[in-house]
């Protein structure tokens, strides 16, 4: 739950378990693989019953738009036996999967990927022996997370050398959660990670609020002069995207990160004139880019080349929308610079990308009626109630009218 200082509440979470298009797609994909997922009567929690071994095919697995399902579950299937086909939406088919497909093939799985290396992905599995492997992780950390999480089900140890790893905090989260469920994981000083085949043990898990999603609420506080607190995100959080609040601190907001909560308070006009590497927290660069026109000097975001291969080419998509608003921007292969300006009335092209829609909705708080979204419903991928909750938290700032598809 997010709380504003004056007692207005929003962003309700049900004991940490989010219901969104992505989480529902992942649940469906698990059940497609034969893993039961049972929802509590009030849908406040899900119980996953594992078998301690890989799945048995044949199975067709529908991942919808969920990149996590398409990247985390094929290694799990490869530890089992039989034929598996992973597929998804046109948007998912456009996302890269080649490094993971190549890694599974080198580990002994029969692999047939679509042109370009993505889904539909066909696997012929006979279990995995483990071994040592180098993995290109320059496009996504999810390839590495998928292999690591499957490793305890392999017949022998797995050692991975992750080359050019992006979004390192997500790997720290993966390792911590694996250990929570009993995995035997070691990391060498040179960065190689070894997982031994020690079976997972069942355990309960309280899920933190999503720091990536919280970035929009924190940014909204900074640009509206309000104070917003997110309980459950504090100094002990492993989520790298909580570091987004430090960019807001650079921009002049007051930030307090306590043991069990984080508060951001807007203090007036945003400060610019800084250059920041957001490679480890690239899911939040769009949030900063969208509010950067409100700063008193340009802001440059770097280290975000891999953001071009997400749900959309996020660097170009953000730059194009800002230019459509009349805001001067400059982009490079791995950077975006945004200059100060006042947005003109614009229809924002969301590119079916939830993060573009949410980021520009925050900018719209400062200019009621100026910005509209061509696909407001795309936020359902990770936050179905986003528009309603933003209104509840900031009722005095009318969000731009929404357009249906």
Image (cartoon, rainbow, N blue to C red):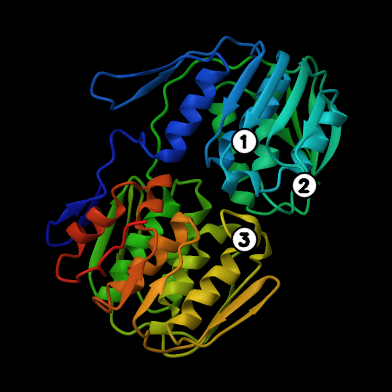
- Circle 1 — which element? helix
Mark toward the start of the polypeptide (2 vs 1): 1
Q: In percent of the image, x 75 and y 39: which residue is there?
A: 114
How many discs mark residues in the rendered view? 3
Quarter residue 300 falls in: bottom right
Query: Residue 267's x, y, as percent?
Result: 28, 78
Q: Quadrant of residue 84?
A: top right
Front-lying residue, 218 or 367: 367
x and y percent of residue 6 in the render? 12, 62
Is 387 or 194 nearer to us in this picture? Answer: 387
Q: Is the residue 315 above or below the residue 182 in the image?
A: below
Position of 276 relative to 269 (above/below): above
Q: Is residue 168 left or right of residue 247?
A: right
Q: Residues within 10 Å of mark 2 (few under 14, many from 20)?
A: few
Give the alpha-carbon distance from disc 2 to disc 1, as whole Å: 15 Å
Is 31 left, or right, of 404 in this rendering?
Answer: right
- Residue beneath the point at 59% across and 25% down: 61
Give the mark nearest the N terminus, 3 or 2: 2
Closer mark to the observer between disc 2 and disc 1: 2
Mark in front: 3 vs 2: 2
Q: Which residue is mark 2?
A: 116
Q: Give the alpha-carbon distance from disc 1 to disc 3, as whole Å.
A: 18 Å
Residue with the mark numbered 1: 70
Q: Give the mark nearer the N terminus: 1 vs 3.
A: 1
Element under label 3? helix
Give the residue displayed 53% in from the left and 26% down from the top. 29
Q: Are marks 1 and 3 in contact (CB under 8 Å)?
A: no
State the image coordinates of residue 87 (x, y, percent, origin top left).
Answer: 62, 33
Mark 3 lies on residue: 307
Give the image location of residue 36, x and y in percent. Answer: 47, 14
Q: Is residue 254 visible?
A: no
The residue positioned farthest toward the front in the image shown? 405
């Amino acid at each position: 739950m997010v709380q504003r200082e004056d007692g207005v509440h929003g962003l309700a979470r049900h004991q940490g378990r989010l219901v969104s298009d992505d989480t529902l797609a992942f649940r469906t994909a698990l059940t497609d693989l034969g893993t039961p997922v049972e929802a509590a009567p009030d849908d406040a929690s899900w119980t996953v019953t594992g078998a301690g071994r890989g799945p048995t095919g044949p199975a067709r697995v529908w991942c919808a738009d969920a990149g996590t399902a398409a990247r985390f579950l094929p290694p799990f299937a490869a530890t089992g036996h039989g034929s598996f086909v992973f597929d998804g939406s046109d948007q998912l088919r456009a996302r890269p999967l080649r490094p993971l497909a190549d890694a599974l093939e080198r580990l002994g799985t029969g692999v047939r990927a679509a042109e370009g290396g993505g889904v539909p992905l066909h696997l012929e599995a006979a279990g995995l022996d483990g071994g040592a492997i180098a993995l290109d992780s320059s496009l996504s950390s999810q390839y590495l997370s998928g292999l690591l999480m499957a490793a305890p089900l392999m017949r022998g140890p797995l050692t991975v050398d992750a080359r050019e790893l992006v979004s390192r905090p997500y790997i720290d989260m993966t390792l911590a959660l694996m250990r929570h469920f009993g995995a035997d994981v070691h990391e060498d000083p040179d960065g190689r990670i070894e997982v031994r085949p020690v079976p997972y043990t069942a355990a309960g898990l309280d899920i933190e609020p999503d720091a990536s999603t919280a970035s929009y609420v924190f940014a909204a506080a900074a640009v509206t002069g309000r104070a917003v607190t997110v309980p459950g995100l504090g100094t002990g959080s492993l989520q790298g995207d909580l570091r987004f609040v430090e960019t807001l601190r650079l921009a002049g907001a007051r930030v307090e990160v306590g043991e069990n909560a984080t508060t951001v308070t807007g203090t007036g006009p945003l400060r610019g004139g800084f250059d920041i590497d957001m490679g480890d927290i690239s899911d939040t660069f769009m949030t900063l880019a969208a509010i950067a026109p409100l700063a008193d000097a340009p802001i440059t975001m770097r280290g975000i080349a891999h953001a071009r291969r997400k749900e959309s080419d996020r660097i170009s998509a953000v730059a194009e929308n800002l230019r459509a608003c009349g805001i001067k921007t400059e982009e490079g292969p791995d950077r975006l610079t945004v200059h100060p300006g006042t947005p003109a009335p614009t229809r924002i092209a969301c590119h079916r990308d939830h993060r573009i829609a949410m980021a520009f909705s925050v900018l719209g708080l400062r200019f009621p009626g100026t910005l509209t979204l061509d696909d407001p419903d795309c936020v359902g991928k990770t936050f179905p109630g986003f528009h309603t909750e933003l209104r509840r938290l900031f009722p005095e700032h009318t969000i731009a009218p929404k357009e249906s598809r």
